[in-house]
Amino acid sequence: MEARNTYQENLIELNKVAGHRPRSTLVLGIQQENNAIWSLQHENDELRQSLTEHQNALDLIMTKYRQQMMKFTKHQNIQITENAYQAEKQYQEENIELIDKIHEMAAVMRHAADVDDEQYLRDYDELSRLEKENDILGGNADDI
């Protein structure tokens, strides 16, 4: 008896929720909801699969990008090293040229100094000779 009362109460409650619609309408509604749920689950599965494919593609792209960046960085480092080597080589060549010019200028200055010394000695000898001659001539002038 108690079970029967519980059954009737449940039936009354279900009828209230169902809005007193016939059973076939409820079944049809439930089937439509099931179809909608199945469709949503299927779409969810497709979206998950698509997300996984996109993640895999992105991983592949990022791997290729990292490889290219490593090659680029390595190339840049090599280029920087080559540029530094070329700059050092050019600097050394310029220094060699400057050193050669300095040696050449020093030789010219040494030659000029030698010529100047020779001229000084000639002038000094001439001056000494003229002083002696002047002394000789000046000493004779006192005798006259």
Image (tube, rainbow, N blue to C red):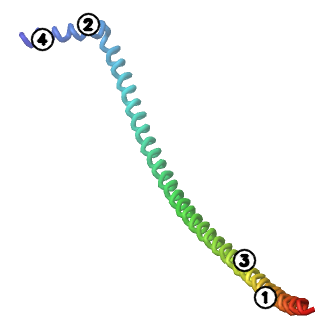
The answer to whether residue 86 is above or below residue 43 is below
Q: Which residue is nearer to you in this view: 116 or 35?
A: 116
Location of residue 126 in the rendering, given as x and y in whole percent from the top left corner: 84, 89
Direction right: furthest residue: 144
Residue type indicated by callout 2: Lys
Residue at disc 1, secondary structure: helix
Residue at disc 4, secondary structure: helix
Residue type indicated by callout 3: Lys
The answer to whether residue 45 is above or below residue 63 is above
Q: Which residue is nearer to you in this view: 128 or 82?
A: 128
Q: Is residue 82 left or right of residue 44?
A: right
- Residue identified by numbered label 1: 121
Mark with earlier residue (1, 3): 3
Q: Which residue is rendered at x = 86% and y = 93% of the image?
A: 136
Q: Which residue is rendered at x = 43% and y = 38% of the image?
A: 46
Q: CA distance from mark 1 to mark 3?
A: 30 Å
Label 1: few (<14), some (14–19) or many (≥20) C-alpha neighbours in 10 Å: few
The answer to whether residue 132 is above or below residue 35 is below
Q: Which residue is nearer to you in this view: 42 or 35?
A: 42
- Residue identified by numbered label 3: 101
Closer to the eye: label 1 or 4: 1
**Can you tell which quarter of the image residue 10 is in?**
top left
Closer to the eye: label 2 or 3: 3
- Residue identified by numbered label 4: 6
- Residue identified by numbered label 2: 16
